[in-house]
Image (spheres, rainbow, N blue to C red):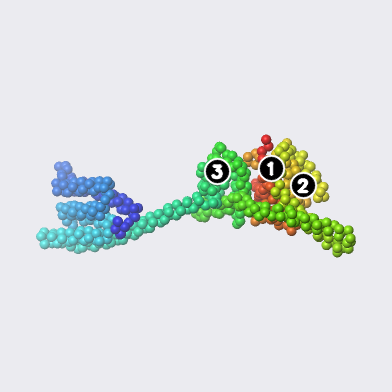
Amino acid sequence: MAPQAVLSREARTTLWRSLQTFTVTRIVIALVLLLYLGVSITGGGLRLDAANTRTCLFYLAAALVFGAFGTWWRHRFAVQLGSQIAVDLVVISLLYVEAGGMRSGLAILYLFPLAGAAILAPLTLALFSSAVATLFLLAESTWQVFMQERQPSLMQAGLYGAAFFAGALLVNRLAARLIKQEELAAQRGADLRIQQLINGIVIADVGDGILVVGDDSAVFTGNPAARRMLGLEGEAAGFSLGEAPGLEPVAQAFGAWLRAPIEGAAFVTVKPYREDSGPLRGRRDQPVHLKLRFARVDTAGTALGRSVVFMQDVSAIENQAQQLKLASMGRLTASIAHEVRNPLSAIGHATALLAEDLHGPAEVRLLKIVGDNVARVNRMVEDILQLSRKVQPNGEPLQLANFLSELKAEFCETHGLAEDIVYIGDAGTNTVRFDPLHLHEVLLNLLNNAVRYASREPNSIRIFPARDAAGRIELHVQDDGPGITPEVRAHLFEPFYTTSSKGTGLGLYLARELCLNNEAKLDYEYRFDTAGSGPRRASGRFVISFSQPS
């Protein structure tokens, strides 16, 4: 066993606790010996053996003193242990001689101090104590052979001595192994505590939000980034995602992943909300677009299901990308107005003059190609110039029902669509604060995108109002097409980004800018429609979130 100075604090504490147990055992043995050897029952009553009584009382007093020292003065462990073993050997030897030597059977008492020495002391001290006890037994047996008329007991003394050495060696090796195991466990525990502290610092400072969620959507913990993204106050724990209306999109995405775990990310939008009662307390004044990733915690062998939800705020990334493109586009706008529009007008005018003189099929086709591309470039220039115009919107409330009905009629007539292809939800008496011309342009842009991908079956294009968790009015534009992938969604509202060869990449960006100019927000969201047995897979749609009407 290693010296106590090189042991860890936990191992030293264990040694002192074992020494206290050793002392308590000594007190019990002293009391038993006092009753067994100090008092004898004869025909006339109780008789005290003076010699044994004095020895046992001394042993009991010494045991109490050792117990007090081991409890209140935890210093000099080796000195205390050595003193206790020495007193044990002396007292047991006196009682052994007084009781008649080997035939008394008290030699077995030597196992108590020798076992204590083997457990608590180095191997050298344990073997030395065994040697002292063995030599005493051999000396006492030799004295009986030469000086008294008794049967020799050298063989028994030798057997006891061999047992003492074997027991001390075995117990000492086992104790040393246990001490090493405890040292290893203490070291592993210290390493684990350090690792936990490091993990806590990393998780607290990481930019991504982290939530630990159970299979029942109960939130167990979350880092500061998660609290900031979700608008939570205090600790992110002690509530269920399903019980928080403001966090319903996160709960639905997590539930869909639990039912069908797949790789990849989910995109959700947490709308403005306020929760002042119940286990969840928090608020968000602005919507936030989150990218969610899920990971299952391996809890094999237990019934506890745990998952980790990683959240990333992609709104800031999208805004940063747009600002970078806008910075370069702003420098381009002035030169486009003069350097592009004038040559473009000349090309268009020349094309019109050529169309009057050339009537062959090939010439007509080529002139049409030129005219179409001139119109496309001109439309792009108009869109770019419109970005710099901050028109003051009309602040009067707008009745949604009449507006949507007129828009549907105009759109179906322009595109030659049947009336049942476009479904308009019941808007009731809802009013919004949005400039009618701006909203008309925004919705036409969204409907033009929808009709490009919709199946043109009945109700394949849907426009319907709804309300978010905070009671604000939303307008959803949805079609039955394949939808937009998360990869495309990440760049959807960036200027000049398009997946169509005929698009300019500015339509959706202009639509979002017009919404912002009217204190509204346009986004593409993945919502979970509830029908029949429960939530289905998320379906994408454009959502316009209006400000509250005054």
**Residue under pointer 1:** 518
| Mark 3, secondary structure of its residue | loop
Residue type (three-letter) at the residue carrying disc 2? Val
Q: Residue furthest top?
A: 550
Q: Which of 26/251 is in front?
A: 251
Q: Which of 387/255 is in front?
A: 387
Q: What residue is at 88 percent from the left and 63 percent from the top?
A: 360
Horizontal and vertical percent for residue 542?
69, 48
* In the rendered image, the vertical position of residue 217 relative to residue 351, given as above or below: above
Horizontal and vertical percent for residue 269?
63, 47
| Mark 1, secondary structure of its residue | loop
Which is more foreground, mark 1 or mark 2? 1
Split into 4 quadrants, where in the image is the C terminus? top right
Split into 4 quadrants, where in the image is the N terminus? bottom left
**Residue under pointer 2:** 422
Q: Earlier in the sequence, mark 1 or mark 3?
A: 3
| Mark 2, secondary structure of its residue | strand
